[in-house]
Amino acid sequence: MNEFNSGTQATVLLLFTTLVTVTLLMCVMAGPDRDDLENFYTGYLKLTPFRNGLAIAGDYISAATVLSTTGIVALTGYDGYVLAVSTALSLVLLMFLLAEPLRNAGRFTMGDVLARTMPGRAVRVAACVVTLSATLPFLVVQLSGAGSLLTFILDLPHVTGARTVCIVIVGTLMIIYAALGGMRGTALIQMIKIVILLGTSTAVGALVLNRFDWSPGAMLRAAQHGSGAGSAFLQQGLELGTSTSERLDFIGLQITVVLGVACLPHITMRLYSAQDVPAVRRSMSWAVGTVTTFCLLVIVMGTGAAALVGSRSIAEADPQGRTSVLMLSQLLGGAPGSMATTLVYSAVAGMVFITLLSSVAGMTLAAASSLAHDLFAHAMRRGQAQPRTEMTVAAWTSVAVGAVAIGLSILVQNWNVGVLTTLAFCMGASAVAPALTYSLFWRGFTRTGLLAALYGGAACVLLLLVFSKAVSGTPAAVFPNADFALFPLQSTGLVSVPFGYLAGWLGSRLDHRRRAADSREHRRLYEESEARLLAAAE
């Protein structure tokens, strides 16, 4: 269904070239000095709440949200609606529970928050390990998807060589953005991305509703027919099934999304760039409003794709439905090859392209920052590294993280990498969320409890996921021809999230009994900073 002519292809290439040129120029202009850590990690805290809110929303809305969630809505209806709403709820939870304490407790990375009352090499190393475990899988998903999507957009042969070239191009740009731009440069890219994203999605949503005379009811009826599922399109079950275990799996997935997405390190890192607590509060208000609006547009676009393109055609082009919004754009302009079709398709293609670039740049920056700041500057140099040295390490770790991500993405480009998205979300919900909430709100939390929450939650996720139905035992699994599934669910959230919290609590209680003196010291340090942490008192 990817009907191309030379005019459309030339327009798309021109748009891509313009976006790359403009964003690279802005990254270079906004990039920090070589010895200016404050600028590299926080952009001097100079972003206004509105701009910082757009940057947070830009980091939060990844290519997976734009493409995969839209595809899930188109293929599964009600289940996709719930996923879109859960995505918005996750940011609301971050706003009300963690945003202000994180801004008060943090400096540059998640390791700074966790080491606030529990300084030491072990805490920094654990923070870095979990940051990489949550960020790198998500980065690989974005890059491996970039290969398939760009070959579709540019009408290239869908072969391994073409996809590999696309992955390398996007990955190289990703490294440049993160290494040169720092927090301020990537924030500018996120702002450009969110403006393009909202503008294009609003236009596509309006065109979809116009096809049905602005009647949501008519659109839903057409989507039921186009999906081939009839009334089941508006009922739970098309995504994972309707049996008891499948319903539990669905609930676990939603819990994982709500708790895990907003706790991913590249999201929380944005909060440290707010000027003060009132600024972070206003920034989060802008971010929540932006993300909620976009999730509503995702529902409209996904439903419109089911109604106008048809779920069967979408699944034939991509079983995960990631090309649904592109296929929808080809129908909204009228006749194939017309000027209107070229404009609509080019706008959507540009939206997808800038989303891919900005998403991977933010994740690369978060991973490189943790390696340079937590592992090198504090764990290895015990906080004595010179700013210029740390900046150099941050730049080279951006290159290293990017190179590893590119290599892994090329290696797994023919796999069903959706399991890596689940892995990232589960890491956020089962390891990062317990560590942050205990560290910020529990006086009795100790170093042993922190390490138990981080390593225990991460190990539980890895163990359960390897032996889950997402990896083997089903046609949609990573290894469909093997069956070593011992865990009956595809998402680990129902088990790993309680396990992460339990590990943190149990580790702290046992630590209190064994080392009462150290535990009292942790409690004293927490109480000294409690007023500023929770109430922003001087």
Image (spheres, helix red, strand yellow):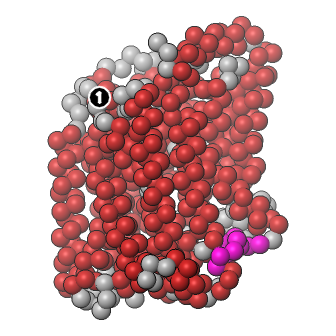
The reply, left or right, for residue 26 in relation to residue 312 is: left
- Neighbours of disc 1 within 10 Å: few (<14), some (14-19), many (20+): some
> Residue 498: image x %, image y %?
75, 43
- Residue 120 vs 285, above or below: the answer is above
State whether residue 116 appears in this view: no
Q: Which residues are magenta?
A: 233-242
> Residue 285: image x %, image y %?
45, 42
> Residue 290: image x %, image y %?
42, 52
Name the residue at 68% across, 24% down.
442
Amino acid type, mark 1: Tyr
Name the residue at 49% across, 79% down.
215
Which is the main secondary structure of the residues drawn in magenta? loop
State whether residue 307 appears in this view: yes
Q: Nearer the viewer, residue 432 or 162?
A: 432
Q: Nearer the viewer, residue 463 or 189?
A: 189
Number of marks in picture: 1
- Residue 123 vs 531, above or below: the answer is below
